[in-house]
Structure formats: structure tokens, C-alpha cells
Amino acid sequence: MKTTALITNDQVQKQDLEESEALSLLSSTQSIIKEAIQKLGFSSDMYELLKEPLRILTVRIPVRMDDGSYQIFTGYRSQHNDSVGPTKGGVRFHPEVTEEEVKALSIWMSLKCGITNLPYGGGKGGIICDPRNMSFGELERLSRGYVRAISQIVGPTKDIPAPDVYTNSQIMAWMMDEFSCLREFDSPGFITGKPIVLGGSQGRETATARGVVISIEEAAKKRGIDLQGARIVIQGFGNAGSFLAKFMHETGAKVIGISDAYGALYDPEGLNIDYLLDRRDSFGTVTNLFTNVITNQELLVKECDILVPAAISNQITAQNAHDIKASIVVEAANGPTTLEATKILDERGILLVPDILASAGGVIVSYFEWVQNNQGYYWSEEEVAEKLRKIMVDSFKTIYETSQAHQVDMRLAAYMVGIRKPAEASRFRGWV
Ligand code: NAD
């Protein structure tokens, strides 16, 4: 058996910080929901219903490690509101997962599904672990154990998981196989983000980045920015950030900055994106190959036209919002900008496209995957791209017009559009 490592003071402080950051994510989400609900004229009972998930399950998952020892992992599945339809949302494998964060993320999924008019409520899952230090076999046993632990509350018509930070199509495949074994039938619609041969959709892997590109195009039109030669900085070089860098580079924009968890690369003349894509590892790490690395915080305040945080939450804060040089900020990551920073950017006239709109491409194509699984008939990549574009453009238009009509920032406008559907569905069901 492995001996349990002693927890140092530094680790305790880091844990406290993570918990308080997650709490602030949840409380700032709740305060915008409250404002949106008031503006829409719903009662305060509606706020009481929607401010927290309806259901959250905490599970402990024993996993046999490769050295013969056992480790018990903690995981969560949160279901915010299922008045519209089954809940839907990714599963995150990360050492900094907390219950509060999973709750907030599940609320955002309800908002995303509301904005894009998908027949779902929001769900989210997470396991506290560091997949970068786990073998393939350990990850497979953890993924299967998680599905066994949450199997009672998930399923193709109840709650449909998907990939998120540090989870991928292989992990979805193991999870689907475990669920199929438990239920004794093939259930491709139980989970999305699967490999194509197991019922995955064309275009799923690149969907989030495609949706961010469409958001950038629409925002650039509003600000009269020509994307040919426009200077773009992207924080994060994982699924969302690296495909975004590739697509923006292909459209003729100049990607002048990228980063990962270990640092950032910046070149005002434009980075060699093909080289970086070729060299990045499966966790989105590439800066470890270079010596001229700057910090993530330095990158965010560099001169550029468009800034895309595509890594983790709480990156643009009251401390650095005054120094952001971009005229457009498009949030590919979930929760990268704090509430105070949102206000500062708005006052400075910077157009911020909020996460629940900009990063909705992933859940839209996940929905397409589920539809294809249910009907057993599969679409071409072109068909998927065309349908995705229509939903993103329409959603951007609705939110931009709402922000103009109500004289509110794009984030509050997005919350107003997103919360209306679960609120109306809950009212029709007679819940409040
Ligand atoms: P990923 O795991 O593929 O990549 C994460 C990237 O962020 C990596 O480059 C990693 O090095 C970097 N990173 C990790 N910790 C960091 C830190 N402390 N500072 C700076 N960089 C750090 O994840 P992803 O799927 O690309 O997701 C990125 C963000 O986009 C997340 O906030 C996620 O919730 C959001 N998102 C992703 C999808 C999707 O379909 N992939 C959909 C919606 C939203």
C-alpha cells in the first residue's frame, strides 16, 4: 500500500484559495441570475429555484493503481435544472475540481442550452485527480468507476455527459462501454464526444473552436475590424485554444500569442502555428520546448486586437482589466473574467463576448451527436458545420440585440436570454 502523503501548509492554503475562487464563481453567477430574473419580471421564487442545482451527487471511486495500491478519488455530478429536458454537460478531470465549481459549471450549461435553444438543462461532472500523472490503465479504471458510481442518475434521456478539461474521446469511449455493460444494451446516446467509430459526430472535436471563430467574426463586424491581419492572443493551447489558433491562422489573422499552464509565447510578427500544433502534447503543453517564455499574466496585457482566454477561470480580474489592450475579448474558457473585470472592460468600451455564448459550439455539436445517435442516421462534416454556424450566428444576434435594447453588457444580456427558457419551463410545469 502507498503511504498517505502529509499535507503541507502551502497545499492547505492552495486548497482554500481554490475553494474560495469556486465559491466566488458560484456567487457571481447567482448575482447575475438574480439581476436577469428581475429584469425579465419573474418572481423571487424563480430565483430561489434556479440559483442552485436541483441535484448534486458526490461519489468516492476506489481505483487500483498500477503499483498495486488503492487510491480513493472524489467525484461529482451536478444537475442544475431538468424542466426543459435531460441535463447535459462535460466531465472534468482536474486536481482543482471542487463541488462549488461543478455546481457553477452546471448552471452555465443551463444558460448555454437556453441561449442556443437546445432541448436540455445544464449538468456537469468532475473528478479531483491529475490525469497528467496517471497511466492509461489507471485512467480507464477511474473513468469506469465514475460511471458505475453515477449510473443511477445518468442516461440518454436523463443526463448526458461529454468531454471537458483533461478528458477526451478515449475517456468517453470507456465511459460509454461501462454504461452499455451496466444496462446490457448499446447506449451511444449516453455520452457525447465519442470517437467517430462509436457514434461520435463529424466536427465534434473542433466544434468549440469553430463556435469561437464565429463569435469572433460577428464581434469583429460590430467593431469594424478586418480579420485579415488582425492580431490575436490566445491563452491556452488545448482542445479549444489550439484549434482556434489553427482556424484563425487559416483565415489570415495573425496569432501573436499563445500559452499553456507553464508559460506563454509572444511574437508581434506572428507565431509559427503549424510548428506549435505539431509539437504540442495531448494536454495542450508546448511552451516547455522554448526558453523565451513569458508568464500568462504578461501575455494577457500584450498589445493585440482580439484576446481569447481559452484556459481556466479567473484570469481577467480587477487587477489587470485596466491594462488589457484588446478591443474585443472573446471568452472561450468558462469563467475567465470576474464580475468586477467585466464592468471595467464594459466601461472601457471593450466588447466582451461572454463564455456562455462564445464557447457554446461544443454543446451544440454534442446535441447533434445525440440526435444522430437517437435516429441512427449520420451527417456529413459540412452539414454539421452549416447547422452550427446558423445557431451561433442567431444566438449572437439575439444577445447583441438584447444588450442594445436593455442597455446592458453582453454577459447580462446572455444571462437574460439563457435563463428565460428554464424559467418558463419550470413555471409551465408548476414548479414555482
Ligand atoms: P484542455 O484540457 O484541452 O486544455 C487546457 C489548456 O489550458 C492547456 O493548454 C493547458 O496547458 C492550459 N492551462 C491549464 N492550466 C492553466 C493555467 N493555470 N494557466 C494557463 N493555462 C493553463 O481544455 P479545453 O477543452 O481546451 O478547455 C479550455 C477551456 O475551454 C476550459 O475553461 C473549458 O471549460 C472551456 N470549454 C471547452 C470546451 C470543449 O469542448 N473543449 C467547451 C466549452 C468550454
Image (tube, rainbow, N blue to C red):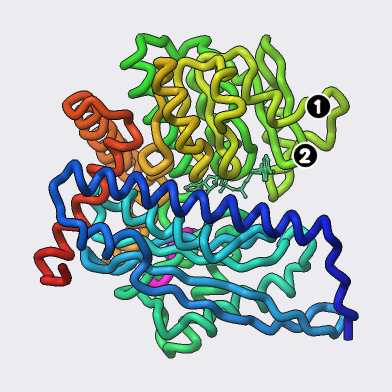
Q: CA distance from mark 1 to mark 2?
A: 9 Å
Where is the C terminus found, in terms of image quarters?
bottom left
Residue 268 coordinates in the image, percent (x, y):
67, 11
Residue 420 coordinates in the image, percent (x, y):
19, 50
For mark 1, give the secondary structure.
Answer: loop
The residue carrying mark 1 is 293
Quarter location, residue 280 = top right
Viewer-closest of 333 and 218? 333
Per the rendered image, the range of residues in magenta is: 190-196
Q: Amino acid at mark 1?
A: Val
For mark 2, give the secondary structure.
Answer: loop
Majority secondary structure in the magenta region: loop
Residue 179 coordinates in the image, percent (x, y):
48, 81
**Residue at image x 30%, y 74%?**
157
The residue carrying mark 2 is 262
- Asked if the beta carbon under badge 1 is closer than 8 A to the nearest atom of ligand 1, the reply is no
Q: Amino acid at mark 2?
A: Tyr
Quarter location, residue 175 = bottom right
Tell me: 45 left or right of 371: left
Task: Check if mark 1's residue and mark 2's residue have beta carbons within 8 Å.
Answer: yes
Viewer-closest of 279 and 105? 105
The vertical placement of 255 against 59, above or below, is: above
**Residue at image x 74%, y 74%?**
137
Magenta run includes residue 202: no
**Residue at image x 56%, y 80%?**
59
The answer to whether residue 372 of the structure is visible from this angle is no
Where is the N terminus found, in terms of image quarters?
bottom right
- Asked if the beta carbon under badge 2 is closer than 8 A to the nearest atom of ligand 1, the reply is yes
* Figure label count: 2
Viewer-closest of 393 and 304? 304
The answer to whether residue 377 of the structure is visible from this angle is yes
